[in-house]
Image (tube, rainbow, N blue to C red):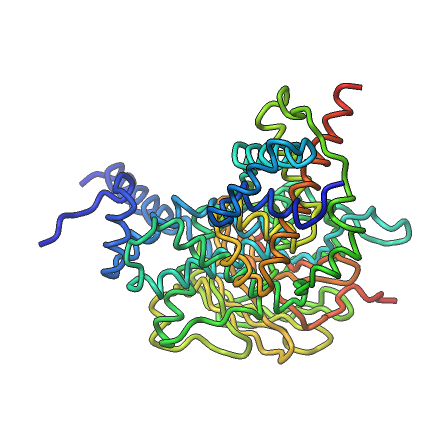
Amino acid sequence: MNRSYVLCRLSLVALLFFACGQPTVNAQGKDLKLVAQLIWGTDGEKPAEAKIKEVDRETRDKLKGVFRWKNYFEVSRQEFRVATDARRRVQMSKNCAIEVEYHGRSVIEVKLYGEDKLLLTKRQILRPGEFLVLAGDDKDDTAWFVILTLAKN
Amino acid sequence: MSAKIDYASAADPILVRAAQRGDLLAFEELVARHRDKVYSRAFSILRHEEDAVDMSQDAWIKAWQRLKQFQHESSFTTWITRIVINLCLDHLRKQKRYQTQSIEVLEAESGGVEKQFPVEIPNPTERLERSELRQRIDRALAQMSVEHRTALTLLEYEQLEYKEIAKRMNCSIGTVMSRIFYARRRLASLLAGLKREDYQ
Amino acid sequence: MIDRDTALKVQALLDGELSANEAAEVTRRLEHDPEARQIYNELELTRAVLLRCEPEYAVPESREFYWSRIRQGIESGERSGAAPESTWWRGWTRWLVPAGATALVGLFLLQRSWLMPQDDAAAFSSDHQVETLLAEATSISFRSESAGMTVVWVQGGSPNFFESNE
């Protein structure tokens, strides 16, 4: 058995190993890298004094495809990692926090807190490119959205 | 062994019989076929999209629960349409949007029905395309009170008799007749009024 | 000016609501009372227009989404043995765009503070487990395949997320 043959076989094994690891990007044992956004949905314009910005195009298109508001503004954005079987709390605003627990194999459990009170718990398989949207109505016919996605590497 | 049904091409009575035996797929096909009609009837009475969706879905759920009682005396669509109408009327009563009115109250509000509008003789609709007419009728119905619109809908589109309309609307036959008369004259006036703009 | 009772009788003639004797009497009236005849013509024309051009309204939801709630109601009714009560979450769809834009499937409903019973767990994947804990809040979960989005809509709770951080 010559060296090139062995190398070829090893390469093939390596290729198969990594191929089988897709699309589950975060196999057991790896950290999960997430992006959380707190978004405000409104039919009005952006208030001049507010330190908020329009959401990116992809997010806007996804939200507008489902929800009826004209404008979506990002109030805050957090990128963070969660290790397998670990929990991470992220403050999105003064009254909004999320706690994410990663169970491995792309399964997360999200707890949403409003004014330190637990509002809901949601378990979800989060796949690349997909959005988990926690949402509800806010005053004056506007809405809040907390969006979780996998960070793009 | 019963023959497998081709749901998409099966006639309604076949689907109904299958659904009566518990075939949910057959019932789903019936829903797909007739959902617009049932929704349409609900919306024509309620003029509220969400409520009409809710009432129409409740009607389908009730229809499933009562399916064994359906004896094919009428068409299935007639039967389910009657269910949604009853649900809509109950809904209106609960919302208290639906007041039983005496003829005297109606006359006081309208100033006497027969004095309301001059009689229009020419055919105001000859040159209107059907789709445009539909839109105008839709707008005219939207402008009516729920009582007038309901009475007219039950008579013209459900072909119910005055007695039956009175029973469902919980009012007297005289009130039904007045409401229908007012609604028709109002519709004629609205159609004629809109049409005059086209010619000016 | 024609009196109200006569006008209503003319209408009743059109609607086939008169007895044979009454119908004959009103028909005779139409032959020599031009005003009565005009009312009859107008009512007849209005009826013809209504029947010819009945407004048609389409359900503002996709087939799957519309059916999913009906199926839920049927299954819920069969489990409980009674007609389903479904009032607490009505009206939530007002937050959605008209459904033509999105095909929503898999509407999953949970009442507040109520975990999925174990015998129902098999019907749902781990994708769709929501536990709402705040007493005054309720939630509805649904998925849009075309948008690649899972949504949990929270009704009530008034979280006040946008209070100023300053």
| Quadrant of image for the C terminus of chain B | top right
Question: Residue C164 occupies which quadrant of the picture?
Answer: bottom right
Task: Give the left or right position of residue A5, taking residue C62 as reference.
Answer: left
Q: Position of residue B66 (x, y in %)?
A: 35, 65
Residue at 61%, 67% in the rendered image: B93
In this rendered view, identify the residue nearer to me: C17 or A11.
C17
Q: Residue furthest right?
A: A49
Q: Position of residue A145 (x, y in %)?
A: 67, 58
Question: Residue B97 occupies which quadrant of the picture?
Answer: bottom right
Task: Give the left or right position of residue A11, taking residue A73 as reference.
Answer: left
Q: Position of residue C38 (x, y in %)?
A: 66, 32
Q: Position of residue B31 (x, y in %)?
A: 39, 50
Q: Residue furthest left?
A: B1
Residue at 40%, 77% in the rendered image: C117
Residue at 38%, 44% in the rendered image: B33
Q: Is residue C145 among the parts visible in the rendering? A: no
Q: Is residue C76 among the parts visible in the rendering? A: yes
